[in-house]
Amino acid sequence: MSATSKPSADPSPTASLSPSQRENETAATIRAHLRWGWWSLLIFLSLGVALEAFHGFKADFYLNVSLETRRLMWTLAHAHGTLLGLVNIAFAATLRSVPQWDERSRGLASGCLKAASLLLPAGFFLGGIKVYGGDPGLGIVLVPVGALLLFVTVFLTARSLAAEPAASSSFAPPPSPETGGRKSGRK
Ligand code: HEM
């Protein structure tokens, strides 16, 4: 880890929120990504079913060799949309493990992931609607933008896990009546 990383006790932007506000924010972000992930899965698995049907009905607009760019684009839209749905669910599952992740960086990672989950598959799908021989349509420009945003999310998430967890982690057990609300374990 770099010597420039902030000490874990640094109260920075997270200090502005009370522990219960922070807990609520985390729960809301988790729910948002779970919702996003499961709806994405439904949409892009349905696209897979549509592609399957195009094969079944030997749809010319999909299977004609002169339109293979369209087939590639729509297959990529299906695959990326489905996998990004799973990435959203993985992101939601990661959030509880990084209670020390500061609000701003976490919000940025979350926003970039949502935008990437939209732009990447949409870019492939739109790029396949009108194709120019071997070239996809203009919609494909959304793909590198989405890819960049996805890199931002992945970098911020990986970096948040590199930092030491703060002493008051959300893994701490709730105060029991015997301890009178005192924290057990470390003094
Ligand atoms: C987690 C679930 C899924 C994932 C990660 C996934 C991923 C992928 C990937 C990576 C490809 C590209 C394969 C290649 O070209 O080498 C693909 C193709 C395809 N998938 Fe899925 N898929 C999933 C579920 C489904 C479902 C449920 C269906 C439909 C019942 C489906 C239908 C298709 C079809 C028809 C193709 C081929 C399209 C073509 O080449 O014309 N997929 N999928």
Image: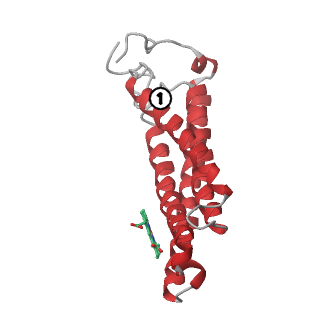
- In this orientation, which residue lies closer to the viewer: 29 or 168? 29
Image position of 1 with respect to 78: above or below: above
Q: Judge whether residue 27 can be spotted in this image.
A: no
- In this orientation, which residue lies closer to the viewer: 178 or 78? 78
- In this orientation, which residue lies closer to the viewer: 23 or 163? 163
Tag 1 residue:
99
Image position of 25 with respect to 69: above or below: above
Query: Residue 144 lies in what quarter of the image?
Result: top right
In the picture, the quarter occupied by the C terminus is top left
Does the closest atom of ligand 1 sit within 8 Å of the Cβ of label 1?
no
Residue 67 image point, x, y percent: 56, 74
- Secondary structure of the residue carrying tag 1 is loop
Residue 36 image point, x, y percent: 59, 53
Q: Judge whether residue 81 can be spotted in this image.
A: yes
Which amino acid, by three-letter code, is at mark 1? Pro
Residue 25 image point, x, y percent: 61, 35
The residue shown at (47%, 29%) is 99
Which residue of the protein is positioned furthest toward the front in this rendering?
133
The residue shown at (56%, 27%) is 105
Residue 172 image point, x, y percent: 40, 28
